[in-house]
Image (cartoon, helix red, strand yellow):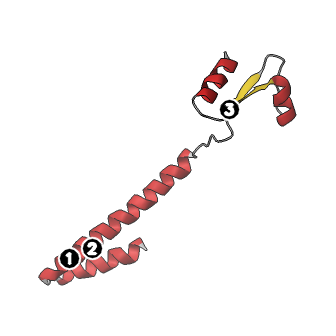
């Protein structure tokens, strides 16, 4: 079944290898495998760390929010509103 899946992946254009229990043990000697173990290895496969990804997105959105709001307040300053200007500068200082 796994060999068939690896074959499908290869036919789809992905580089995939079927690793038997012997091959697995050669690649990772610390891996506990029995005679019936096998794996599909995709060397171009990559994984994202979910926590780091969310942290990065939050950081970008956080900065965007403060800069957008600060620039909006700076635009409002054109109406000669001193309080908006002062608040915008505070936001810009806080966001950086």
How crowded pointer 1 is (Cα within 10 Å; few <14, some 14-19, many 20+) is rated as some
Which is more toward the observer, 75 or 6?
Answer: 6
The answer to whether residue 78 is left or right of residue 10 is left
Residue ID for mark 1: 75
The answer to whether residue 8 is left or right of residue 57 is right
Instruction: Pick whichever of labels 2 and 3 is earlier in the sequence.
Output: 3
x 57%, y 45%: residue: 48
Which is more toward the observer, 85 or 78?
Answer: 78
Cα–Cα span, label 2 and label 3: 50 Å
Q: Quadrant of the C terminus?
A: bottom left
The answer to whether residue 67 is left or right of residue 13 is left
Q: Is residue 28 visible?
A: no
Residue ID for mark 3: 16
Residue ID for mark 2: 71
Cα–Cα span, label 1 and label 3: 55 Å
In what element is the residue under mark 3?
loop
Tell me whether circle 2 and circle 1 mark residues in contact (CB < 8 Å): yes
Rendering quarter of residue 82: bottom left
């Amino acid at each position: 079944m796994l060999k068939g899946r690896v074959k499908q992946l290869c036919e789809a254009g992905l580089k995939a290898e079927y690793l038997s229990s012997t091959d697995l043990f050669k690649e990772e000697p610390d891996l506990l495998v029995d005679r019936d173990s096998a794996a599909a290895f995709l060397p171009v496969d990559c994984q994202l760390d979910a926590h780091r990804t969310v942290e990065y997105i939050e950081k970008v959105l956080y900065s965007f929010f403060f800069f957008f709001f600060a620039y909006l307040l700076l635009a409002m300053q054109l109406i000669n509103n001193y309080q908006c200007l002062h608040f915008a500068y505070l936001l810009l200082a806080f966001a950086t």
